[in-house]
Image (cartoon, rainbow, N blue to C red):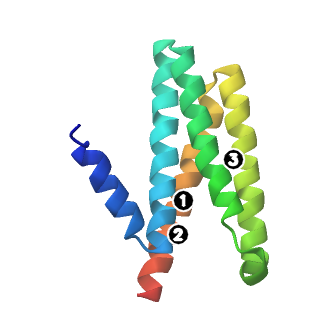
Amino acid sequence: MIADPYRQYQQIKITSSTREDLILLAYDGAIKFINISLKGINEGELEKVHFNSIKAQAIISELMVSLDMDRGGEIAANLYKIYEYMNYRLTVGNAMKDTGPFMEIKNLLFELREAWVEAKKNVS
């Protein structure tokens, strides 16, 4: 069986990325799944909304557990609270099939992503 070249590329990209790059990839993935959920709401495809909301929540949960609370101190604690809030709002958006919570979290993810991009520039 021939392996999927796109999957192979993605696997190499993930395994060769820095921690900062992985966080950006996680934000990009969560935003992607939120966009699919928003499309599902607009098209009345409730199953699409549900499954992609769950995928976005899984990414955010992974970001939560990857926080180093000992070394990260107050920043890590604050990020944890933000991620917790994001998961809550995505749950609400999924349950109500409401675009508002999805848009809110998408905007928060964009802001966090931009902050990581800036932080990465300052470290490099």
Residue 110 in percent (x, y) is at: 50, 55
Can you say whether 99 is above or below 67 in the image? above
Q: How many marks?
A: 3
Can you say whether 51 is above or below 78 in the image? above
Q: Amino acid at mark 1?
A: Glu
State the SS at label 1: helix
83 relative position to 38: left or right: right
Which residue in the protein does label 1 denote?
Answer: 111
State the SS at label 3: helix
Tag 3 near tag 1, CB within 8 Å: no
> Of discs 3 and 1, which sits in the foreground?
3
Q: Amino acid at mark 2?
A: Ala
Sequence-first tag of 3 and 1:
3
At label 3, counting other C-alpha atoms closer than 10 Å, the crowd grade (few under 14, some 14-19, many 20 or more) is: many
Q: Amino acid at mark 3?
A: Met
Q: Which residue is at the front of the view, 66 or 2?
A: 2
Disc on res. 86:
3
Residue 23 in percent (x, y) is at: 52, 64
Sequence-first tag of 3 and 2:
3
Q: Which residue is at the front of the view, 55 or 100?
A: 55
- At 64% from the left and 24% from the top, the residue drawn is 98
Which residue in the protein does label 2 denote?
Answer: 115
The span from disc 1 to disc 2 (Cα, nearest Å) is 6 Å
Tag 3 near tag 2, CB within 8 Å: no
Disc on res. 31:
none
State the SS at label 2: helix
Tag 1 near tag 2, CB within 8 Å: yes
